[in-house]
Image (cartoon, helix red, strand yellow):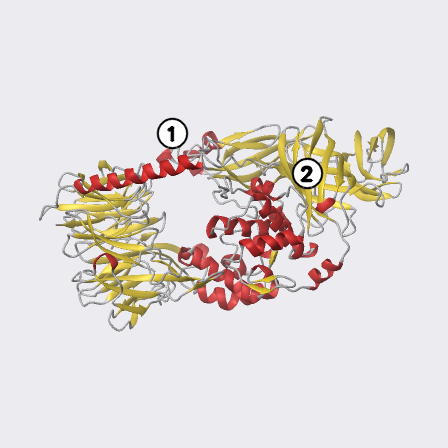
Amino acid sequence: MKNFKLPRLTGGFLLGLMLPTGAVQAADAEAIIQTKCMACHTQEKAEPLQMSRMSHQRKTPEGWLMTIARMQVMHGLEVTDDERRTLVKYFADKQGLAPEETEGSRYAMERRLNTMESFESTNFEQMCARCHSGARVQLQRRPASEWKHLVNFHLGQWPSLEYQAQARDRDWIGLAFNEMVPELASNFPLQSTSWDNWQKVDKIPASGRWSFSAHMASKGDIRGVMTVTGGKGDQYKVSIDGEYADGSALQGSGTAIVYTGYEWRANLTVDGVKMRQVFALSDDGSELTGRMFEALHDEAGMDFSAVRNGSAPTLLSVQPEYIRAGSTEVLTLVGTGLGEEISLGEGLSVVNEVYRDENKVVLQVTANTTATPGSRVVSAGKAGGASLNVYNKVDRVKVVPDFAVARVGGNGGSTPKYNAYFQAEAWMNGADGQPDTADDMRIGYLPAKWHVEAFNEQAEADRDVHFTGKMNAKTGVFTTAAAGPNPERRMSTNNAGNLKVIAEVMDGDKALNAEGQMIVTVQRWNNPPLP
Amino acid sequence: MLPRSMTIMLTTLTLGLTTLTSGLAVAAKGPALKPGNEYMVVANYPNQMQVLDLQTDTLYKTCDMPDRFGPGALQVAPDKKTAYILNNGYEDIYGVNMDTCEVTFHAKMAQTPKERTKTLYAFALSYDGKELYAVQNPTLMERDHYVVQPTRLAVYNTDAGLDAKPVRMLPSPRLVTAMQTGKDGGLYMAGADIYKMDVHTGEYEVAVPSRNWQRERYVQPDVLNVWAVQTPTKDFTILYTTARYQKGSEDLNTADWIYGYFNINLETGATETKDFGPLTEIYFTGTRSPKDPNIMYGVLNRLAKYDIEKQTLIKAAELEHSYYCVTLNQSGSKVYLAGTNNHVAVFDADSLEHLKTIELPGGDMSTTTAQIFVR
């Protein structure tokens, strides 16, 4: 007998369950709703179909997946994986979010779990974002009646939540019903002009050849071509063919689906590793932007942007994005429609054009010793949109991120390690010679030598450096230690700890140091698609 | 995967085994408790109540509990024969005859099939043991939505048997955790403040202000206590943490961070709000010495001992792992630590020397309440 199991209700991994295997028809979804959901939900209207609760909310594809999975796990809904995929597609298309409604919150869908959130509303931060990301809330739209149901659901499902810190100090239930419900209904209403307008927009298929530029901590710059074919039922075949900055190849293929007319989700196998893509297609259909990350280790990921061949000439990036005055370097221009005439700005000249195709131009470029430090607008014919940073010295370096959380894992447990990725970002102080002022110039990510140290006396006493994991001196990747109580540690504690993350960057003969902080902690046991 | 018929067969087999096991369990009720002897009771996974003999600091007997474990919060009846346990995922209270391991009382917190009702540790017995009080957090499970209901105090007769129904239900403040009854019959309920309720009329007043205390230069205290530890001195003790501003300042950076306790003497009704030391580490529970009320013990990652009047830490013992619940024997000579893992640690109350660790059969004790009593 088919019985639903979610063997791993974990983050990026679960996203793999989202991709339908066949074209989805609204009629199919409505037939499932009318057979599987009526035990609990009430049909409010037949034509068009309107159901209690579910017809009065809008969410992202991940949001709908979480809702339906919860119905399975907690409320006995029995649907096949295919039926669930059909439902997610139907709801995301019919009751999704307009592109601008996801702005500022896409990091949650993109699985950027090290994002430090901050919100203007203290109430929102303490009442909602205390337990899960604020983005999870901001990626939903409901009328007041449905936000009220959500409060009831929260307290009914987790009755201990009002006893917890930052809840027991206040009239939690009064605040939730009387202040949070109106605030949420006002900030995230079911009806919106954005959504009304988006529904009227003709959706553009994603098929074609896409020139892409990406950047990944530990790997550096990446570029290549992504080929997208198909489109029936918004489903595509995808292949990518690219290269890392060191020239090594990046190749893979898989399948993709577009929800809501713009939410691109793909599962690929890239050089033997399962990866996901969470992108947004721009309104004019010319660009795809977002993040591509490993399915199992979603902390390993790249910022990704692509431009469709045949759209207006565009320069996505200059790789690397910096050049030192007085040096000659190989720079790669990535984009589409890159013209013959290269403009690099004052003090820079092309020595030699090494390679050219429709998606990239490889140049040997010299920066004069006297080139004025600053950002240059670069163009290749009509293709513009990227810049190049000229510097003559590195004034300081920052560790990015300057605060990170990594997690122990593995060791026979259900949860993999969550490692940490660091980059050394170089800066010039600008004309005033002072750091952290408006005229500072970001140079870019420079190679660094990495190590970790105990953050404080406690970390020293507990030998955190020894127990928590290993920093790769060259790549800046910190691989955490095994999960579980460690009998070798004081009180048999986990391999958790508090570390300084130190980067050393060489600028000529001069060594510059930067320091960040990393907390290595225990597993994230509750890891749904939207954190 | 097993073919369906095989699965059914296995299920049948398992059912048979279960029946057999419970049949055997009847014989395994263990010895009765001996009048005059001192015992400690705790609960742990998979779902057991453990009685320890404190004359020898050894396990005396194990009683199997019905349904499922959690949280295993315990109260011992005044007659010292029956222990009441909140279990089955916070949804049921059972009375267990410790002599026979027999379940003599059972109350489901939910009052209708549509309700899902949890009690967050908030239950207590009347001073004479005839009534049991529980603060219930009900949620109505409607077809496609939940509706959180107001909290209520349900009053049960303890002789109501295995299908006990409330004899009274009264509106209760929210957020109540630990509760104890006073000799005068009043029910002390630790919530946002510590209330005292008339269990017949439901009227209540603030007995000890907590969230709403008015102490000059003190900020609102933080209180979380889910362990209603019964003491031989009839003290109901709850720890708080707070900060006290320097004179003329409202700056938390320069404030003194303080640990303190609320106390209600259940016999006299006398209340206290008293700081006992600087806040340097967290304790989940604290209790005063039965032989010296000026000594406060606290535990989480260390076992600490404070001089209350001097507001100083006298001593602290390192622990092999965290413990949640601290209690002392009646004479005040030994400290017992429980909660987390299946270890009960015994310390000398004066020197804080580790005397013994008693290993219990089964697993973690979760947030069980360790109760010590003389039969």
Residue drawn at x 48%, y 48% is A73
- Residue situated furthest right in the rendering: A341
- Front one among A492 and A314: A314
Q: Position of residue A334 (x, y in %)?
A: 79, 37
Label 2: how many Cα within 10 Å (few below 14, some 14–19, many 20+): many
Q: Amino acid at mark 1?
A: Glu
Q: Position of residue A14 (x, y in %)?
A: 56, 42
Q: Chain of mark 1?
A: A
Residue drawn at x 16%, y 62% is B128
- Asked which secondary structure carries label 1, the reply is loop
- Residue situated furthest front in the rendering: B5
Q: Position of residue A103 (x, y in %)?
A: 67, 54
Q: Earlier in the sequence, mark 2 or mark 1?
A: 2
Q: Is residue A387 visible?
A: no
Mark 1, residue position:
A488
Image height check: is B259 above or below A208? below
Q: Is residue A2 left or right of residue B211?
A: right
Q: Position of residue B185 (x, y in %)?
A: 20, 67
Mark 2, residue position:
A255
Q: Amino acid at mark 2?
A: Thr
Residue B13 figure quarter: top left
Residue A402 figure quarter: top right
